[in-house]
Amino acid sequence: GQTPVFPRIFGHEAGGIVESVGEGVTDLAPGDHVLPVFTGECKECPHCKSAESNMCDLLRINTDRGVMIGDGKSRFSINGKPIYHFVGTSTFSEYTVMHVGCVAKINPAAPLDKVCVLSCGISTGLGATINVAKPPKGSTVAIFGLGAVGLAAAEGARIAGASRIIGIDLNANRFEEARKFGCTEFVNPKDHDKPVQQ
């Protein structure tokens, strides 16, 4: 049902170094190492002040918005025509422009090529398990898909104390790696005739 604007620069998971900051930005300075966050935080609205939600009134994920919030304009163009932003990050570019609420400052010693997955994959999977599903200690958890998000979800289940963590994936080559993240048993739907939930 969404009608995003085109052309636009995609990408949301990355790591980078601040080149410059806009007027009034005091939380960041040139040279800071950062991760983009496509569900940003204004830190002022009721959602940002709540421990139960991260759907900021100002910076929540909005695939339709292709411009900066402050002035409603794009910061990208070619031949004088706008190229629109994507979820406030547009990281498939050498440089990007983001609202300060969509940037998380990190330790400069952290290698950007490794910690970039924290800007989505790891935080999404771990957060979905620990903050949303909240599995009780000793519970059984099933995780569908053992990519970056799924592995992080398994780690979250392990941290929460789940006793059975069932990893489900069509690619059995992922099972051994998933064991390192807490999966205790595995199901490949291709190996069964009945529905995988049975």
Image: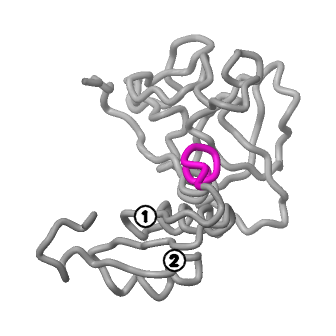
Q: Earlier in the sequence, mark 1 or mark 2?
A: 1
| Residue linked to disc 2 | 183
Q: Which residue is mark 1?
A: 143
Residue at the image position 32 percent from the left and 73 percent from the top? 169
Q: x and y percent of residue 146 in the render? A: 42, 70
Distance in Å between CA atoms under marks 1 and 2: 9 Å
Image coordinates for residue 36, horizontal then vertical, percent: 63, 44
Q: CB atoms at circles 1 and 2 under 8 Å apart?
A: yes
Residue bounds of the magenta highlight: 127-135
Can residue 115 be seen here? The reply is no
Amino acid type of the residue tagged 2 in the rendering: Cys
Name the residue rendered at 50%, 84% in the picture: 177
Q: Nearer the viewer, residue 155 or 101?
A: 155
Residue 184 vertical placement versus 39 (above, below): below
Q: Locate residue 8: give its quadrant.
A: top left
Q: Residue at x 59, y 59 (%)?
A: 122
